[in-house]
Amino acid sequence: QVQLVESGGGLVQAGGSLRLSCAASGSISSINIMGWYRQAPGKQRELVAYIIGGGSTKYAESVKGRFTISGDNAKGTVYLQMSGLKPEDTAVYYCNAFRSLPPKNYWGQGTQVTVSS
């Protein structure tokens, strides 16, 4: 089992920055991918970015050039540096850890990010 705890959400004005952090505990060695998802009111949860153990990253088109994911899967840590925030970035952000064998997703409790215009 893997437990995830996020921190760093809050209220920020448009154009501002926030940094989200996530720390995993438990069976950290089983984690293959760590990332961030978000869910806005009335919308489905969507991928924001993820980082694979070797360091490869992937971003949603809507955040490319504004958000940067970093971390160390071996240590069970992942961060999301968000800059140039827009009101449409307002959502609950969830840390995610994926184990491939056998496949299982783990989720944090979520942290609210609110961007005011």
Image (spheres, rainbow, N blue to C red):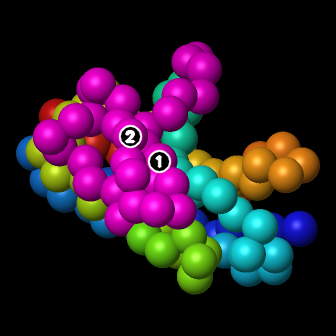
Q: Who's the residue at 53% across and 62% down the image?
A: 53
Residue 33 in the image: x percent, y percent? Answer: 59, 54
Query: Does residue 7 lie above or below 42 as drawn?
Result: below
The answer to whether residue 98 is visible is: yes
Residue under label 2: 58
Residue under label 1: 50
Residue 26 is drawn in which quadrant?
bottom right
- Label 1 vs 2, first from the N-terminus: 1
Residues under labels 1 and 2: Cα distance?
Answer: 5 Å
- Mark 1 and mark 2 residues within 8 Å of each other at the beta carbon: yes
The C terminus: image quadrant: top left
Query: Crowding at label 2, few (<14), some or many (≥20) Cα neighbours within 10 Å?
Result: some
The N terminus: image quadrant: bottom right
- Name the residue type under label 1: Tyr
The answer to whether residue 112 is visible is: no
Magenta stretch encompasses residue 64: yes
Q: Is residue 42 left or right of residue 67?
A: right
- Name the residue type under label 2: Lys
Range of the magenta residues?
Answer: 42-70
Q: Helix, strand, or loop for circle 2?
A: strand
Residue 103 in the image: x percent, y percent? Answer: 84, 44
Residue 62 in the image: x percent, y percent? Answer: 28, 26
Q: Check residue 61 in the rendering and tell me which mark sits there, or answer none.
A: none
Q: Who's the residue at 59% across and 28% down the image?
A: 45
Residue 54 in the image: x percent, y percent? Answer: 46, 62
Q: Who's the residue at 43% across and 70% down the image?
A: 71
Query: Does residue 91 lie above or below 80 as drawn?
Result: above
Which of 58/38 is in front? 58
Q: Is residue 106 left or right of residue 70?
A: right
Q: Helix, strand, or loop for circle 1?
A: strand
Q: Who's the residue at 70% across and 63% down the image?
A: 31
